């Protein structure tokens, strides 16, 4: 089937969807750099429609039935090339994460460098009610109506049972060229953490009905999935169905297989339309997502990037040790997006990768330096200047997701790299070339990885050199 054919076949005649461009936003969400300088423009749209809620048929794997309908009004954010000739034809639609009571865009943060350099369009969808109305117990309130009551006064969400169809209708608007750009040749869906729970249900149940996307990228998913009634926190196991319609690529940090996500319980073999990578040294949340990704504009200021990655304990979250500061996960995300795009267009699937070692009782298996064993390897794990872990000893709901960064004693560094920085960089480059050959890091990112490694090594050896 040609790309886009399923979208035309599944388009709903007489859809109540209405799309209206909002005034330019006062600030660009989730970035602190100038999108305009990079040739991109930010736009916001008010999307109005009537969404369906779904229920399972008597056969739990059979077709869905419509359980009801409700009116809604939400917002959709678009970052696109200001010059349409720069557009690659690919649009990436993110289910915004609202677990903390505010819309966040972790996939945009991790993927924006790859999307911008290749000219892709990003679409962020406020699919869930908490992004508009807030979440109970989350203070201070940072949901849309709290952030700008006047701008977002008209937004109205009936509840998360309708979120699946709201996401579909936003994708329909993108596919039909109603969000300020022409119909895309390739439409990809993505989401992280809580959003990945909803997208798991979307992939397993709703996508067979909607037929809008050409592929999906899920990151940091739980063993379970959201219910059709919109409950995010639930028991049970939800592997990706073996007969998925389009390619599905899952990226898991080492936090998730045996931690609170327990994703090892839904490990499954790779297929022609399914891949899962578990990334050594990566955390569910990290300093790139928390801080560095907001300022990383690709300008080549590696020194500034290295400093932004080094978040002191307590600055962003009350952690006992510095959060995971490995750059690895965002570089692997970039490679995964490029793999998925080619795969969705009929190319070869991404390479398969081994799972991380370990078990639920002891956690991730580690070497003598506390580096994770198995999984997708990067030089940030295999040539450590400091040890990046996806696990920590924190007990808070969010704190436990951010891993930790532990220094290596000077004597250990001297034993590992007896010739100093030159020795370290030679070994780092060798591991980097192996990661590129394995498909885990893009050749486009080799030079930056090497420069960043040199800078971080200097900071580790001489902490005052910032």
Image: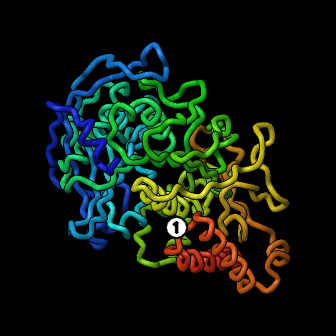
Q: Is residue 124 left or right of residue 216?
A: left
> Between 225 and 140, which is closer to the camera in this rendering?
225
Q: Is residue 33 left or right of residue 440?
A: left
> Between 143 and 209, which is closer to the camera in this rendering?
209
Name the residue tied to disc 1.
308
Which quarter of the figure has residue 322? bottom right
Where 440 sits versus 165, above or below? below
**Residue 355, can we see it?**
yes
Q: Residue at x 22, y 44 (%)?
A: 173
Where 424 sits versus 199, above or below? below
Q: Position of residue 135 (x, y in %)?
A: 41, 32
Q: Residues within 10 Å of mark 1 (few under 14, many from 20)?
A: some
Picture quarter with the C terminus: bottom right
**Residue 291, can we see it?**
no
Q: Position of residue 125 (x, y in %)?
A: 32, 43
Q: Is residue 430 left or right of residue 151?
A: right
Q: Position of residue 459 (x, y in %)?
A: 64, 76
Residue located farthest toward the front when viewing the structure as drawn: 1
Q: Is residue 215 left or right of residue 174?
A: right
Where 350 sits versus 165, above or below? below
Q: Residue at x 31, y 68 (%)?
A: 34
Q: Residue at x 35, y 19 (%)?
A: 65
Q: Residue at x 63, y 40 (%)?
A: 268
> Between 115 and 338, which is closer to the camera in this rendering?
338
Q: Position of residue 333 (x, y in %)?
A: 51, 58
- Looking at the rendered structure, the secondary structure element under dot 1 is helix
């Amino acid at each position: 089937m040609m790309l886009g054919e399923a979208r035309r076949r599944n388009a709903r005649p007489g859809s109540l969807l209405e799309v209206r461009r909002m005034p330019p936003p006062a600030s660009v969400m989730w970035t602190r750099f100038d999108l305009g300088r990079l040739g991109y423009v930010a736009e916001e749209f008010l999307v109005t429609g009537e969404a369906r809620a779904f229920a399972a048929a008597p056969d739990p794997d059979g077709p869905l039935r419509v359980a009801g309908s409700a009116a809604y009004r939400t917002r959709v954010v678009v970052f696109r090339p200001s010059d349409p000739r720069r557009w690659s034809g690919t649009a990436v639609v993110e289910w915004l994460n609202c677990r903390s009571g505010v819309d966040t865009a972790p996939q945009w943060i991790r993927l924006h460098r790859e999307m911008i350099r290749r000219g892709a369009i990003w679409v962020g969808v406020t699919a869930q009610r908490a992004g508009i109305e807030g979440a109970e117990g989350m203070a201070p309130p940072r949901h849309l109506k709290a952030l700008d009551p006047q701008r977002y006064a008209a937004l109205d969400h009936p509840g998360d049972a309708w979120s699946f169809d709201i996401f579909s209708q936003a994708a329909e608007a993108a596919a039909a060229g109603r969000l300020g750009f022409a119909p895309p040749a390739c439409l990809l869906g993505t989401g992280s953490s809580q959003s990945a729970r909803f997208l798991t249900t979307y992939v397993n149940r709703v996508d067979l009905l909607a037929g809008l996307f050409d592929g999906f990228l899920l990151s940091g998913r739980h063993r379970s999935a959201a219910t059709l009634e919109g409950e995010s926190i639930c028991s049970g196991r939800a592997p990706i169905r073996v007969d998925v319609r389009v390619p599905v690529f899952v990226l898991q940090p080492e936090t998730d297989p045996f931690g609170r996500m327990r994703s090892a319980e839904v490990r499954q073999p790779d297929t022609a339309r399914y891949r899962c990578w578990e990334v050594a040294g990566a955390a569910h949340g990290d300093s790139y997502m928390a801080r560095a990704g907001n300022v990383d504009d690709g300008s080549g200021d590696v020194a500034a990037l290295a400093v932004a990655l080094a978040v002191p304990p307590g600055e962003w979250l009350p952690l006992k040790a510095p959060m995971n500061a490995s750059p690895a996960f965002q570089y692997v995300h970039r490679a995964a997006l490029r793999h998925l795009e080619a795969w969705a267009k009929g190319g070869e699937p991404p390479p398969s990768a081994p799972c991380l070692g370990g078990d639920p009782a002891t956690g991730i298996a580690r070497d003598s330096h506390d580096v994770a064993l198995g999984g997708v390897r990067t030089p940030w794990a295999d040539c450590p200047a400091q040890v990046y872990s996806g696990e920590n000893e924190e007990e808070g709901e969010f704190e436990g997701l951010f891993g930790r960064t532990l220094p290596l004693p000077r004597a250990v560094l001297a034993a590992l790299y007896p010739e100093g920085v030159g020795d370290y960089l030679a070994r780092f480059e060798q591991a980097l070339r192996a990661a590129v050959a394995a498909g885990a890091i893009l050749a486009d990112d080799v030079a930056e990885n090497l420069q960043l490694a040199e800078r971080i090594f200097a900071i580790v050896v001489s902490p005052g050199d910032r």
